[in-house]
Amino acid sequence: MARITAGVATSHIPALGVASDLGKTEEAYWAPAFAGYEWTRQWERAERPDVIILVYNDHATAFDMKIIPTFAIGCAEQFKPADEGWGPRAVPVVEGHPDLAWHIAQSLILDEFDMTIINEMDVDHGLTVPLTMMFGKTEQWPCKVIPLAVNVVTYPPPSGNRCWALGEAIARAVESFPEDLNVQIWGTGGMSHQLQGPRAGLINAAWDNDFLDGLSGDTDRLRHIPHIEYLRETGSEGIEMVMWLVMRGALGRKTEQLHRHYHVPASNTAVGHIVLRPVE
Amino acid sequence: MTGPRDIHEYLAEFEDIPGTRVFTAKRARQGYHLNQFAMSLMKPENRERWKANERAYLDEWPMSEEQKQAMLDRDYNRLLDLGGNIYFLAKVFSTDGKSFVQAVSTMSGMSLEDYMAMMIAGGRSPEGQRSIKDKR
């Protein structure tokens, strides 16, 4: 049986990918942001996941304004790093897991989550930066990846509660897959940041850290945060944190925190990262 | 469910956030061609045509004159008002060779140096930036 063994959350700031690609991670500005991922890189080498369900958002790359899926699951064999306007990142092609992805897609639809199924898609920094942060520079990613894209660009995005419930349904789907697979689920984006307008540059470290606190233990208080609170407290792009709740929902009633990292700034954004283990 | 279920109530709250344009359906409709124009700059051949003659390239798109002028001026706050979305506008400033920090700082009304210094010092405080009516 497949099982979800851990949850990971991280910001997916494009500048982190650029810093890695250009070999700048030792520079004074970037070093503290990257240092908090060293623990996780070691841990991932020991965990050896087979598949990662990677919850992220597309940033006007694979999806433009023509089609806006709320929840979309990538069922392809491969996903190429996208050309976001300055050429594709020099990182490995992302290998999918079509058998598990289709199993999850079918199960979710039976479970009343009306998924969009994607059979061809390039993946942008939202997906490749988390892989870089956790696995560093490599010739090949060490596991398969199932992209799960959430609309957090055009309002309304899904509610935090719906994201959490989707995570719960993903966990049920994974548990009913017959092959013995070590599966992790990652939630990405955030933390506080605003990339637009006169309020640009907003950071709310107190709120972010309270959100990190709320991910471990048996509380489900985070699922009830309304969109307006993310907007007011964490900036217009802080809404990405609803994607962390898909991850948290998939870990069941109770979790324990294995590792945590918070750093301001990377470019315009607060870097947040947490590693969680489901507790029976 | 959390927050309002009434879409009118849900949307009305967005108008109370200082210095912020939430990308609502209304803005998405107003900015449809503006954003699709920006998206076209993902392709190298389109970037070349845009750089060769910005005005001529813009005239191929059914955008308003205001939108075209704001684009030529790289007036990003105006472009947000006219339905632009930051992830689409990113294609334009990336083509200009500008980073997110450089482009975003222009919207904040601060110099790049002051903006970067603010970020290194911990970013813009949310105090007084949460609500216009409640002044908090």
Image (cartoon, coloured by chain):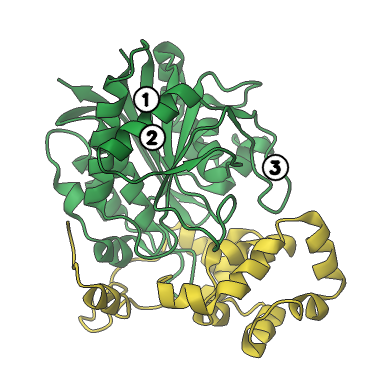
Residue tagged 2: A105
Going from N to C along the chain, the mark reached first, 2 or 1, is: 2
Amino acid type at mark 2? Ala
Image quadrant assignment for residue A136:
top right
Q: Mark 1 falls on what kind of element?
A: strand
Q: Is residue A232 above or below residue A135?
A: below
Give the Cα separation between the discs numbered 3 and 2.
Answer: 28 Å
Name the foreground residue: B86 vs A136: B86
Residue B6 lies left or right of residue A155; in this view the side is: left
Single out the residue that lies furthest toward the bottom: B65
N-terminal label among 3 and 2: 3
Of all chains in the rendering, the one displayed in green is: A
- Residue lying furthest left: A218
Residue A54: image location, x then y, percent: 43, 35
The residue identified by callout 1 is A184
- Element type where label 2 sits in the image: helix
Q: Chain of mark 2?
A: A
Residue bearing the label numbered 3: A88
Q: Colour of chain B?
A: yellow
Callout 3: few (<14), some (14-19), or many (20+) C-alpha neighbours within 10 Å?
A: some
Q: Which percent across, then down, holds residue A177? A: 33, 19
Chain bearing mark 1: A
Between the residue at mark 1 and the residue at mark 3, the CA separation in whole angstroms equals 26 Å
